[in-house]
Image (tube, coloured by chain):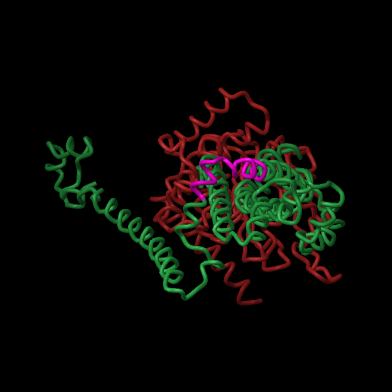
Amino acid sequence: MNPPSGIRIEGVTHYFAKPGSKEYTPVLSDVSLEARAGQFLALVGPSGCGKTTLLNMIAGLVQPTHGKVYRGEELATRPDRDVAYMLARAALFPWRTAQKNVELGLELRGAPRQERADTAARLLELTGLKDFAKSYPSHLSQGMRQRVALARTFALKPKFVLMDEPFSALDAQTKLAHQEEFVRIWEQTRTTAVLVTHDLAEAILMADRVVVFSPRPGRIKADLEIQLPRPRDLETLRFDERYRDIHERMWMELKQDVDHA
Amino acid sequence: MSTVPKTYSETKGNEESATASGGDAALPPPPAPSRNWRLYGNLTTQALRIGVLVLVCGLWQLSTSLGWVDPFLVSTPWDVARFLVSSLSSGDIWPHVQATVTATLIAFVVGSLAGIVTGLVLSVSPRLNAVLDPYLTIANAMPRVALAPLFLLWFGLGQTSKVMMGISTGYFILVLNTHAGVKAIDPDLKTICHVMGANRLQMFTKLILPAAVPAIFAGLRLSVVYSLLGVVLAEMLASQAGMGQLLQYYAGLFQVQGVFGVLICLSLLAVAGTAVVGAVENRILRWQ
C-alpha cells in the first residue's frame, strides 16, 4: 500500500551515458527508500553520488534505468503539478516582477487573476517581501530572490516539495535565515519534502530523516530518523546537546566509511 | 539603525520613537549631488562635440582654399551646406527620400518579422534546425548584395526589387539572433517550467518568446541599418527613384557636394531608425 502522498523508491539502479562514447557510468546502485506522507527527508552525499538524479526521478524529469519511483500511488513518469521544485539558484523569470514570478505556477494552471494576486500577496507577506511585489529580480538581492523562489514553491500548495541545494548559494547568515524561514513555512504546511544537500548539519537541523549516500555509484550508507522536537528553532537548536550528539554520531559513521574506502 | 551602542534605559525613551520615525542616522547623509556639475559636464561634452565638427569642416574648407586638394573632387563644406539647403527647400530631394524610406520600412518590417518567425520555428523544432542549418549557413555566408542583379531581372526597376534586396540583408540577422536568444535560455528556467507542468504552448508563450526578446531587439537595431543598406544598393544599381539612384546621378555629373549631401541624409535616416528601435526597446525591456 502506498501512502497517499508519500514517496517510494524501489530498487533503483541508474546509468548515465558518457558523452561521446557508447559507455555508461553507474550513478545509483540499488536504492530503495520509502518516505511517508508529510515527512521531511534529506538526501546527503558527496558530489556526483546521484542524489540530484534521484530527486529528478521523483520530479519525473529522469526515468531510472532499472527500478521504480512512486509519488503517492502514481508512478513518477513525468512532471506533475503537485510537485514543486527549488534549485540552488533562484531561477526567477527576469522579465516578471516578484509577484508575477510567484503567480507563474497558478498562471500555468489557468487560475483566475484575483486568485493569483491573492495567493501571491499572502506568500510575499509570509516571506517578508510585501513591499517588493512590483520589483523585478534584477533589483532584488540574492537572498530576496531566493525568498521569491520559496514563495513560488509554496504558491501551488504542492503535495511534494523537492529541493536541490536551495541554500548553497547564500552566505552563512542569510543561509540560516532562509533555513529557518523554510522550516517555519514547512511546519505550517507539512508537505512531503525532499532536500538534497551536501551539508550534513543542514540536513539534521531541518529534516525528520537523513539518508546518507556513498560516493558514485550512490547507495544508501545510513538512514536515520532525527528525533528532534518541532517546531524547531534552528538558531538555538544549533547549540542543543541532542543535535550535537546526532551530528557527531553521523559524522563518525561517515568518516569511517571514508577511511575504509 | 543606529550603530551607537545603547543601554536599555536609553532605548525606551525618546530615542525609540526617533528610530521608528526613520530619522535614525546620527550623522546627516551626504548632500545631494549637484545638478550643476552634471549640467556642466554635459555642456563640456556637447561643446567638444561641436568643436570636433567645426575642426573637421574647417580643415576641409582650409585644405581646399589653400589648394592642397582639388575642390572638384572633394567639394567644400560650404558647397555641401548650400546644396542641402537648396535641395531640401526646393523639394527636389523629397520624392527620393520618400522612395528610399518607404522601401526600407517595408523591407525592415517584412524581413524582420519573417526572420523572427523563422528563428522561433527553428528553435522549437530541433529536427528542422538540424536539416536546414547548413543551407542557412551558406545563405548567410553568401554576399547577398551579389543577388541584386538577379532581383532586378526578376522584379524590375520598381519598388519590389529594392524591397527584396532590403529583406535579404535584414532577414538573416533576425533568424540568427532570435535563434541564439532562444538557445541562451537558462536551463533552470526550463526545469522550473517543466516541473510546474507547462505544456508546449505555455513553454513557448511564457518562456521562449519573452526570453528571446532582448536578442531580437539587438537584431532589430542592426537590421534597420542593413535594410537601408540593401535598399540603397539596389537603387544604385538601377532604379527609377531613390537616394541610391541620386548618389549615382550626382557622382556621374561630378557634383561631389550632392554626393556628400545625400550621404549625410542617409546617415541621419539610419541614426533615426536605430534611435526609434532603441526607444521601443527601452520601453519593453524595462526589467533589465
Camera-nearest residue between B3 and A33: B3
Could you tell me residue B188's position as x and y percent?
A: 64, 51
Residue at 61% from the left image edge and 36% from the top image edge: A104
Q: Color of chain B here?
A: green
Secondary structure, magenta segment, majority class: helix
Q: Colour of chain A?
A: red
Q: In the rendering, at what x and y percent does residue B22 appear? A: 23, 38
Q: Where residue A194 sits: x, y (%)?
A: 62, 48
* Front-lying residue, A68 or A143: A143
> Height in image: A24 above or below A230?
below
Q: Residue at x 12, y 37 (%)?
A: B13
Q: Quadrant of residue A70?
A: top right
State the image coordinates of residue A85 (x, y, percent, origin top left). Answer: 63, 45
Q: Nearer the viewer, residue A142 or B243?
A: B243
**Picture residue at 67% right of the left edge, 60% below the top:** B252
Q: Residue at x 61, y 59 (%)?
A: A44
Magenta stretch containing residue B32, yes or no? no
> Magenta region: which residues?
B84-101
